[in-house]
Image: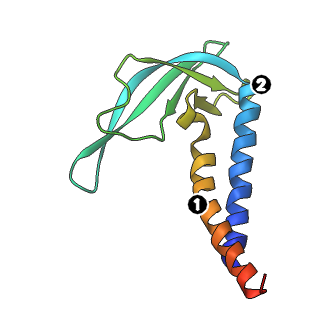
Amino acid sequence: MGLLCLGVILLYYAYQQYTKTTKLMSHGVKTTATVSDLIQINSDDGGYTYKAVFEFMDYDQNSYQLTSNVRSNPPMHKLGDRVKVIYNAKDPEEVKVVSFWGLYQWSVILSCIACPLIIIGGGYLMYARGL
């Protein structure tokens, strides 16, 4: 029963992230950001991964930065690359890179964890009840 409950809770949070992204996509402001820095991070295996730092301007010409959650080696972007971002006009700190992973990262991760838990927990519940 615990696995089923945990799976449902995670699926609920995945859905919340999805609706938050959908709302941002429908009401947000799209603009272009430039990769201004690549942060080098030490990996556990002794190598390095890189996170991009994006810089963009809002309509009032205020500058904002977004540090990517995605790390990779080799880097996904080079300094000076331009990418599309979308931000909330009322809160420019709420910003996402317009790409599948940039928009739906947490929805996908939480769903991938939730679904097996729901299947296993639901199967156990059905077995325990003799269904």
Asked which secondary structure carries label 1, the reply is helix
Q: Quadrant of residue 70?
A: top left
Name the one closer to the observer, 56 or 129: 129
Left/right of residue 111 with respect to residue 8 in the rendered view: left
Give the residue at x 40% y 22%.
36
Q: Amino acid at mark 1?
A: Ile
Quadrant of the rendered image containing residue 78? top left
The reply, left or right, for residue 128 in relation to residue 69 is: right
Residue 31 position (above or below residue 99):
above
Disc 1 versus disc 2: nearer the observer: 1
Picture layout, residue 9 above or below residue 13: below
In the picture, the quarter occupied by the N terminus is bottom right
Residue matched to label 2: 27
Q: Tell me which colouring the rendered structure shows.
A: rainbow
The x and y percentages for residue 54 are 47, 26
Residue at 35% across, 39% down: 72
Q: Position of residue 65 (x, y in %)?
A: 52, 28
- For this rendering, which residue is in front, 121 or 66? 121
Residue at which label 1 appears: 113
Q: Is residue 48 left or right of residue 124?
A: left
Of residue 34 and residue 129, the one placed in the foreground of this image is: 129
Query: Disc 2 on helix, strand or loop?
Result: helix
Residue extending farthest to the front is 131
- Please tell me which residue is depicted at 66% across the width and 68% down the height of the picture: 119
Judge the density around disc 1: few (<14), some (14-19), many (≥20) Cα neighbours within 10 Å. Answer: some
- The quadrant of the rendering that contains the C terminus is bottom right
